Amino acid sequence: MNWLRVFFHGGLTSYRALFAWINPWIFLPVLVVYPVFQTVFFVYLGRAADVADDAFFVIGNSFVAAAVTGLFGMGQAIAGERRFQTLPVLLASPASRLALFLGRAVPTMANGFVVATITFVLGAALMGVTIDRAAYGGLALALAASCFACAALGLCVGSLTFRARSIGVFADAISAALLLVTGANVPLERLPDVLQSVSAYIPLTHGLHAARALATGASVTDVLPQIRDELLVGAAYFAAGLLLLRYFERDGRRAGSFERF
C-alpha cells in the first residue's frame, strides 16, 4: 500500500512541480507548435531529396516528439529536486527507489503519448497523409512502448544531474542524435553499418519499425517482436538509470555534494 502511495502521489506531485513556476501556455509552443513545424520541415526536405514518402516523416517526427518529452520531462523531474534542494530529503527517505522513479516516469510517458498523438494528427492533416484506421490500435501500442523506453533514457540523463549544473545540454545532444540514429528521418539502410548496429540498442528504433510496418498494412501480431524489443530496450535503460542513481547517490553522500553546484 505504501509502495502504491509513493508511486501515485509522488509521481503526480513531481509532475505538477515541473510546471509550478512557468506559465502553462508554454505547453503550446514548445510541445505542440515546435514538433509540428519540425514534421513539416522534414516532410518537405524528404520530398526534395526523394528519400521516403510523407508518412515516413510524419510517423518518425511524431515519435521523436514523444522522445524529447521523455528525455526532458524525466531528466528535469530529477534535476528539479536538486535545484530546489529537496533531493537530499528524497534520497534520505526509506521509500522504494523503484516506486519513486517509476512514479515520476508514468506522467512523463503519458505526456509524451499525448504530444506525439497531437503531432501525428496535425502533421498528417497538414501533409495529407492517410493511414488505415485499423492500424491505430497497433500504432498506439508501439507509441506506448516507445514512450516507456524514452522515459527510461531520460532517467539515465537525469542521473547526470549529480555531476552537472544542467542536464539540458545532454538532453539536447541525445534528442538530436535520435533524429538520425533511430531512423526517424533517415532510413536505417542508408546509414553506415556502425550506426545501423548501434540503432538496435537505442529507444525509438524498434517502435518506429513497428509503427511504419503497421502503417503499410502489417497486423499487430506481425510487429509484436519489435514492440517486445522496444520494451526490453526500455527496461534495460531503466535498470541502468536506477544503477546510476544509486552510484551517484552513494558518491554524493561520501563527498557531501548533493547541494553543491
Image: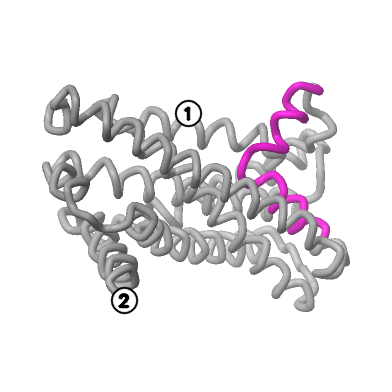
Give the left or right position of residue 223, taking residue 71 as reference. Answer: right
Residue 127 lies in quadrant: bottom right
Residue 5 lies in quadrant: bottom left
Q: Amino acid at mark 2?
A: Met
Q: Quadrant of the N terminus?
A: bottom left
User: Is 150 included in the stretch rendered in magenta?
Assistant: no
User: Secondary structure beneath disc 1?
Assistant: helix
Q: Which residue is mark 2?
A: 1
Predominant secondary structure in magenta?
helix
Location of residue 172 in the rendering, given as x and y in whole percent from the top left corner = 44, 33
Q: Nearer the viewer, residue 113 or 223?
A: 223
Q: Amino acid at mark 1?
A: Ala
Mark 1 or mark 2, whichever is nearer to me: 2
Residue, x 17% and y 58% (percent of image)?
20
Q: Nearer the viewer, residue 116 or 206?
A: 206
Q: Which residue is mark 1?
A: 173
Residue, x 70% and y 66% (percent of image)?
139
